[in-house]
Structure formats: C-alpha cells, structure tokens
Image (tube, grey):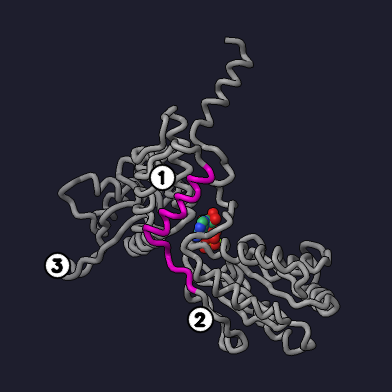
Amino acid sequence: MPLDEAFIDASYVSYTIIKDKRVLRDSYIPDTLPGREHQIFQFSRILSDLLVDQPPSDVAFIGKPGTGKTAVVKHVIKKYRNEYPNLRAKFAYVNCSQATTAYRVLYQLNRSMGVLVPPSGYPFDVLWDKFVDAYTTSNSRLVIVLDEVDLLVKRDGGRLLYALTRLNYDLPEELSISLVVISNTMDFLERLDPRERSSFEPNRLQFPPYNHPQLYQILRQRADLGLKVGTWEDEALQYIASRVAQESGDARRAIDILRMAAELAENERAEKLTKEHAIMAVDTVNEEEVSITVRTLPLHHRLILAAIADVLERPVVRAGTGTIYKAYEQRAHLYGVKPLTMRRVSGILRELESQGLVEIEMQYGGARGNTKVVKKMALPVRQMRNLLAQMGIR
Ligand code: ADP
Ligand code: MG
C-alpha cells in the first residue's frame, strides 16, 4: 500500500468511537449541568440583585473536587454575560491554584480591570492602590470569583479577602464588590482568623458528591456529545457511574474513565465500547493516579510501600506495624541506607494512608497493645510492585 494511503487508513481507524475529543476533556463545560440545577438556581438568584442594580451578597461554594463548582460558576457567569450584556457589573474570575499568592491574585484582578502591572516585584501596597483606583473609576459593580481559594488562604491567610471585604465600606453606594469563594475543603472559613471571619459571612452553597444516577446522566451527556452514535453500551456507563459513586462521586474522574475506556476500545479496534473496556479503564486510571502520587514520594516512603507489599503477599501474616518494620529494615539494608526509627515509620504509614495509598485499620488490645494494621493498598499487590519496579525499587 502506498504511504499516503496507509496514513489515511490509520487516521480513519483511530477515530471509530470518539466523535469529538474536546467533549471528553476536563476544560469542556457543557450547556447543561445535570444534578446541579439547585446550585445554579441559587447562585443565579443571588446574582439577580445585579439586575436591579443592588450588590449581591457574598457566596462560598463548598464541596470536594469534581463536584461541579467551577463548572457552575462559569456556566452562570456566562449566562449573565450573554443574557444581560448591558449589566452595570463586571465579573473577575481568578483561579488560585494558578495564582497561588495574594500578589498574583491582585495582579490578575488588576488585569481584569484593564490595568497592566509587572507580574512580580512591585510592592503589594502599590498594586492594591492601582486596583482600588481602577475600580473606583470603573462605574460598575464587581463580582470577584476566587476559585480554589483554600490554596490562597493556606499560603497567605485571609489578608486579601479581608481587604476586599473591607473595601465596600469605603466605596460609594453605586459601587460594590461581591466575593464568590470556591473551596475544596469544608473548613476553610473556620480557618480564617476571627477578625477576618467577622467581616466575611458568605451564603454557603454546598456541592455534595454526585450519586450514581447523577453520574450516569453526566456520562450519558458526554457520550451523546462526544462519541459516535451506536458505538457504546449503556452498561459501560452504568458501571463507571456506580464505581465512581461508591468511591468519590467525582465527575472529573468519571469522565476521565469514560475517555480512557473509549481510547482502550479504539486501540483494540473494537466496534463498541463495552463494560469490559470500562472495567479496564477504571484500573488504568487508578494506576495512573497512584503512579503520579508514588513518583512524588521520598525513598523511604517507597521502601515502606515495597515492604507492605512484601508482607501482604504472605497470606498468613498480619500486616501490623512491627512486621512491616522488619520487612522495611531488610529493604533498607539491601539499599545500603540507614533505616528510620519505628516511630518515624509509623508516622509515614499515616502519611501513606492520608494520600490514599494504603488502608489502615486499628486493632485494639492483643499481646502488644494497640497496633495499626494495613488492610490493603490502592492497587493490587502485583500492580503496586510493577509500579515500584519502574521506579527502581525491586
Ligand atoms: P470542581 O470545580 O468541583 O472540582 P469541576 O466543575 O471542575 O469540579 O468539574 C469537573 C469536571 O466534571 C469538569 O470537566 C466538568 O465539566 C464536569 N462536570 C462537573 N459537574 C458536571 C455536571 N453536573 N454536568 C456535566 N459535567 C460536569
Ligand atoms: Mg474547580
């Protein structure tokens, strides 16, 4: 076969199932958001004060990752911009996972007011004054969205939030700043210091994890928009929805798995995306996630993981801290590094647990008092071993 014909053939074969790749990406926001009707309604209602030229109250969106917070805020703002082009109000959206310092956030806010300042190196106060000047001459209300605000507060405290809320007291009536803060952690408001908290009492909008029927609807929408008609089995979507509902209720994850399943099916040259592809995709996506976390671990953490695998492979032995420690000591010697203390290793077990790499259960009483026992790892032992082997831990 001539070369260019082969090319045409290959590109044809590789898109048998996926119709539009963009739809399966994280950045894509569909026109409707199944399961978030209530939050959209509530948030739209709060903003509707703008329609009668009144300042909307502050809002806090609270919910775990993948519960649709960013999607809802963008959806509603877009709706306002499209439906009310003459609104005397501006929206400024800043994602604090990119702008991680108060300086960077203020830099972005200046930009959204059309003021260009250097991305670093200016005194904070100068930046602040520029922002206030630009804002007070803008003649419009301002709605500031601080997405992933918990990251900002963790790093810089509530100083900027506080300054923004206080600003309203100095502004004339026809100007106002409303804050929409979005947080992945539940307790971020409680972490502000009391003075900051007393001047900032937003309405709370909760984003619970998605349940099975909601995840199914979300996946169904992506399949309808992103996959070719008749190339996927409903059972596959049901399977993904049920797995993700049990684990986390995270829509991002569900969509990731769907995309992976579609790619696996295409790579196999399968006619349809089936439940089997979905099952494989769950494992693949899990492995990718675990692999990303394991790659960030220091050597001793990895050795401890390998030691846990050693112990879990021996069926009769209980994976208690003492047993794990012995296996870890052996591995440390093998690597020619000095083992950490038992106490430290016990602490690392907790770290591994909080990163979701192992599941631990406390066993009380017994000959040696209370002890931590590792029940299982985030991946089957063999898979975890392969992963560690790729990183040089055999
Ligand atoms: P969060 O900001 O809470 O972490 P996102 O809003 O970024 O979550 O949602 C994660 C992914 O899932 C995005 O790709 C988003 O488009 C999608 N998504 C979330 N909720 C819905 C929904 N109700 N309907 C359709 N897609 C959704
Ligand atoms: Mg988000």
In this view, the residue in front, 311 or 229, is: 229
Q: Disc 1 residue type? A: Glu
Q: Which residue is mark 3?
A: 366
Horizontal and vertical percent position of residue 38: 50, 71
Q: Position of residue 267 (x, y in %)?
A: 46, 30
Going from N to C along the chain, the mark reached first, 3 or 2, is 2
Circle 1: element type: helix
Q: In the rendered structure, which amino acid carries the disc numbered 2?
A: Glu
Indicate yes or no: mark 3 CB to ligand 1 under 8 Å: no
Residue beneath disc 1: 287
Callouts 1 and 3 close, C-beta under 8 Å? no
- On the image, the x and y values in percent for residue 325 come to 29, 55
| Left or right of 169 on screen, residue 253 | left
Disc 2: which residue: 190
Element on which disc 3 rests: loop
The label shown at residue 219 is none
- Asked if one can make out residue 233 in the rendered structure from this viewpoint, the answer is yes
Q: Is residue 1 above or below residue 251?
A: above
Q: What type is the residue that disc 3 sits on?
A: Gly
How crowded pointer 2 is (Cα within 10 Å; few <14, some 14-19, many 20+) is rated as few
Q: Which span of residues is magenta-colored? A: 206-226
Closer to us: 148 or 7: 7
Q: Residue at x 58, y 17 (%)?
A: 6
* Residue name at image x 55 percent, y 69 percent: 40
